[in-house]
Image (spheres, coloured by chain):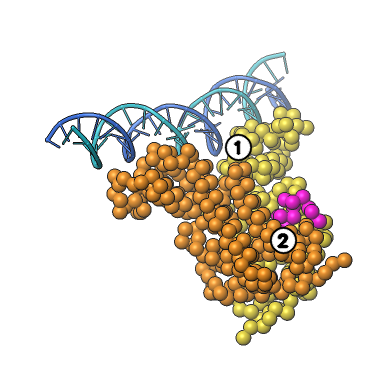
Chain colours: A yellow, B orange, C blue, D cyan
Amino acid sequence: MSRALGAELGRGGRLPRSARRKQLLAAAQEVFVANGYHAAAMDDIAERAGVSKPVLYQHFPGKLELYLALLDTQAEALGETVLAALARTTDNRERIHGVLSAYFEFVDRSDHDGAFRLIFESDLVNEPAVRERVESVTERTMLAVADTVASDTGLGTAEAQLLSTALTGAAQVAARWWLASDRPVSQDAAIHLLESLLWRGISNFPRQS
Amino acid sequence: MSRALGAELGRGGRLPRSARRKQLLAAAQEVFVANGYHAAAMDDIAERAGVSKPVLYQHFPGKLELYLALLDTQAEALGETVLAALARTTDNRERIHGVLSAYFEFVDRSDHDGAFRLIFESDLVNEPAVRERVESVTERTMLAVADTVASDTGLGTAEAQLLSTALTGAAQVAARWWLASDRPVSQDAAIHLLESLLWRGISNFPRQS
DNA sequence: TCCAGCGTGGAGGTCAAGGTCGGCGTGCTG
DNA sequence: CAGCACGCCGACCTTGACCTCCACGCTGGA
């Protein structure tokens, strides 16, 4: 059961530094996703990669930095995907569709590597560096959505941000539930349903005084 | 700065067993909320309560059980509040209002004791007992909402559950964001805005084939 | 007033996990 | 063919946090 990634290399396989680093990151992500940060042992990660602990520490100064490297990559990926979906069109219904697709595809892709758990189910939110990363990506996407909401509805900043938080929160929670429930409907159907819900909710939002 | 709760008792204050237990639970909740599970030390909890560690272990067999006792109480409270809001009326818009109020008031009350963090920001989700509690309360509320959604829209079970997850997820995420952002609008205004959003989304949801 | 008993407290054991040091195998050079 | 440098592994050390043992002091009755 051990060293699934390093098996084909044998224990003595010599790798270029960058390739070794990527392999260590992949192994670490598997262990962090499966066990969470605290229950993940550096020994497990090293064994999973088919190397020994000292080499791990030759690539990363510590456990936290290793985790942050993964979190940075994945948060960046999610943020870019959502931002791109918003920028791809000016049709707001299409934007909702795109954002929902972004969340679902990120979560679904993560079914292979579980990346979304690093962001949305991290057990290291007390660490300021981690909290800062997670809040950064959620806030960036929320603000982008809030811009659209504000110009679409004429609501004030705080009101638009509240609704944007609700919209993105709905997408995120629903996508995670959908995956955790073993995709009870197809991804297209799920996105379509949520798109109807959210679009009916936000389009022609009642103007306020 | 220490022993804030036990100060008026002095160090040697003798308490009836049930009162001592309640005091220990309150001290533990403060420490768990402030630091998370892992960073919370039993020494801190004991000191916060103005007692010493052995008495803590005379009331609770271990750190996990102490945490679970708090989590059970708070999850039960949240679940009952939401369920009650659903049962209080048959008007679905009123129901949405009630559920939103339930989340906001739970989170807002939690501003004093931070209980919602135990449920929604726990750093112990890997522990099966904790995960089971958290999923239990979210699923109970989701299923209750899904019943209403299903009978209101005629959607299938999976579809209704997906929408219910989105609705409750929106409420939960929005309420937490509202609190974390220092209540940028009044609670009534926030609830009213979200009520409009969700009600427009779910009412007269397009019937499917 | 004296004594017995029990709850309390400080000091310590244990253990797990993050973070390093002496052998070893490999490939190159004189 | 022999010696040497270099990168990797097994074994260990330390820290920190959960969880208990010996002395003290307060309560309540004769």
The span shown in magenta is A172-185
- Residue displayed at 72% across by 50% down: A180
Instruction: State the image quarter where residue B198 is shown.
Output: bottom right
**Crowd around label 1: few <14 · some 14–19 · many ≥20 (10 Å):** some
Residue B118 to residue A18: above or below:
below
Residue sticking out furthest to the bottom: A209
Q: Which residue is mark 2?
A: B146
Residue B15 among those drawn in magenta: no
Instruction: State the image quarter where residue C1 is shown.
Output: top left
- Residue displayed at 75% across by 32% down: A7
- Left or right: A126 in relation to A50: left
Which chain is home to disc 2?
A: B
From where the camera sits, is residue A141 visible?
no
Q: Which residue is mark 1?
A: A42
- Residue displayed at 73% across by 79% down: A204
Q: Where does the image place residue A13, in percent across and percent down from the top left?
A: 73, 31
Q: Where does the image place residue A2, in percent across and percent down from the top left?
A: 71, 32
Label 1 and label 2 in one chain:
no
**Quadrant in which the N terminus of chain B is drawn:** bottom left
Which chain is home to disc 1?
A: A
- Residue displayed at 57% across by 61% down: B81
Q: Given the image, on which type of amino acid does mark 1 rest?
A: Met
Residue C3 to residue D27: above or below:
above
